DNA sequence: GTCTATACGGTGATAGAC
DNA sequence: GTCTATCACCGTATAGAC
């Protein structure tokens, strides 16, 4: 992997766990093993530019995971349930220290940086579209699919906050069941 | 209001809009109008202690709002819908710059401060209990009430993230409708 | 492309007068 | 209880050699 990509990957990881302000450029250089002098060579606009790229990278990766996982089952309600359980397992595996790569930066920078807010907005747009497309493919109307997708993205982000704060996967697991019910309910009526 | 309380109130407000790391003690002193020398007199353990008190204050206030608003309607599904719509209106009134007093600090400090994580955990516990109690009062089982309460708190926090990032109340409004449906569905079956 | 050194501002926190 | 002054530290960012 190129030095530039290595820096972005490390930054994504640190942003997910620590957020924007707690993640220093020194730490990024140190943990990425990248040459210290090359940071401003690759990212002339500094921390904000690097963060925007890292957010974008995390968003694309998580969107890919959504699309992959949502293709594994036929029934949309069961699909969402399994997906959420997978998130819960993944969170537990990391001791509930990660799992929401965008949320912290989105909240921290909502009032401080247009650029980063736009990056987070695009990220959530990707998630939402991925879920919505899956529901449309199962026969939901465009409108209903979009509504469900919004609820699910919100429930994921909120569930991650609760699970990280409680250091327990239980909230995500509870939410998994409720989302299954509401998707099933929407599907059958 | 006492100087001490004024400091806490200002801190709560700034934490809600900016988070922990972006809120400086200088700004707190300046905006609160409090005497600069009294900060470490009232909060000898510094920023962390002050923040813990501010989180606690915000949590108690929001819990009071939950309890008040949830008592205004009889039907639990309609109650949740109206409550969420109220949140959406409130968010819109502040141009979607606030509305989630705990989330930012919870995510920022999840891996950095046991004390603040505990404060956020207690805050979410209050919310969850307030919602659950309302559902039990409507005849839900303890278990089902607790599950719904978890989903609702997560949906609120996640919905706030989306609305703040998009600078639009639309996500919260969409979620309001979905939560009404799932509560109604739970109630009738 | 990468290095070292450093400028510059802001932070939380402390000391001591009053 | 409050004020002012100041500390030590850390952050981002830049300059200039190689």
Image (cartoon, coloured by chain):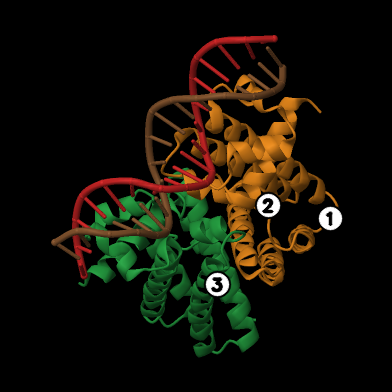
Chain colours: A green, B orange, C red, D brown
- Marks 1 and 3, Cα distance to the nearest angstrom? 41 Å
Q: Position of residue D9 (x, y in %)?
A: 37, 34
- Marks 3 and 2, Cα distance to the nearest angstrom? 41 Å
Q: Nearer the viewer, mark 2 or mark 1?
A: 1
- From where the camera sits, is residue B99 visible? yes
| Residue that numbered label 1 is attached to | B74
Check the picture and name the quadrant holding the N terminus of chain A: bottom left
Frontmost residue, B80 versus B105: B105
Frontmost residue, A156 versus B135: A156
Classify mark 2: residues with Cα within 10 Å, few (<14), some (14-19) or many (20+): some
> Disc 2 is attached to a residue of which chain?
B
Q: Nearer the viewer, mark 3 or mark 2?
A: 3
> Disc 1 is attached to a residue of which chain?
B
Frontmost residue, B48 versus A182: B48
Q: Position of residue A24 (x, y in %)?
A: 38, 51
| Residue that numbered label 3 is attached to | A118
Check the picture and name the quadrant holding the C terminus of chain A: bottom right
Q: Is residue B168 above or below residue A172?
A: below
Which residue appears at 23% of the width and 68% of the height? A3
Q: Quadrant of residue B187?
A: bottom right
Which residue appears at 80% of the width and 59% of the height? B75
Between discs 2 and 1, the one toward the N terminus: 1
> Disc 3 is attached to a residue of which chain?
A
| Residue that numbered label 2 is attached to | B140
- Marks 2 and 1, Cα distance to the nearest angstrom? 14 Å
The verdict on a common chain for dots 2 and 1 is: yes
Q: Quadrant of residue A58?
A: bottom left
């Amino acid at each position: 992997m190129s030095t530039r990509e290595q820096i972005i990957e490390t930054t994504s990881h640190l942003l997910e766990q620590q957020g924007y302000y707690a993640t220093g450029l020194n730490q990024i250089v140190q943990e990425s093993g990248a040459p210290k002098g090359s940071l401003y060579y690759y990212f002339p606009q500094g921390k904000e530019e690097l963060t925007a790229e890292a957010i974008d990278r995390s968003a694309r990766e998580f969107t890919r995971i959504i699309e992959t996982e949502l293709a594994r089952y036929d029934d949309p309600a069961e699909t969402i349930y399994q997906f959420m359980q997978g998130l819960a397992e993944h969170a537990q595996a990391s001791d509930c220290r990660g799992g929401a790569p965008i949320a912290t930066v989105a909240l921290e920078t909502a009032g401080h940086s247009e650029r980063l807010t736009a990056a987070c907005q695009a990220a959530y747009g990707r998630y939402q579209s991925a879920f919505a497309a899956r529901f449309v493919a199962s026969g939901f109307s465009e409108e209903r699919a979009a509504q469900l997708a919004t609820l699910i993205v919100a429930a994921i982000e909120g569930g991650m906050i609760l699970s990280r704060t409680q250091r327990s996967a239980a909230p995500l697991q509870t939410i998994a069941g409720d989302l299954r019910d509401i998707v099933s309910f929407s599907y059958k009526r």
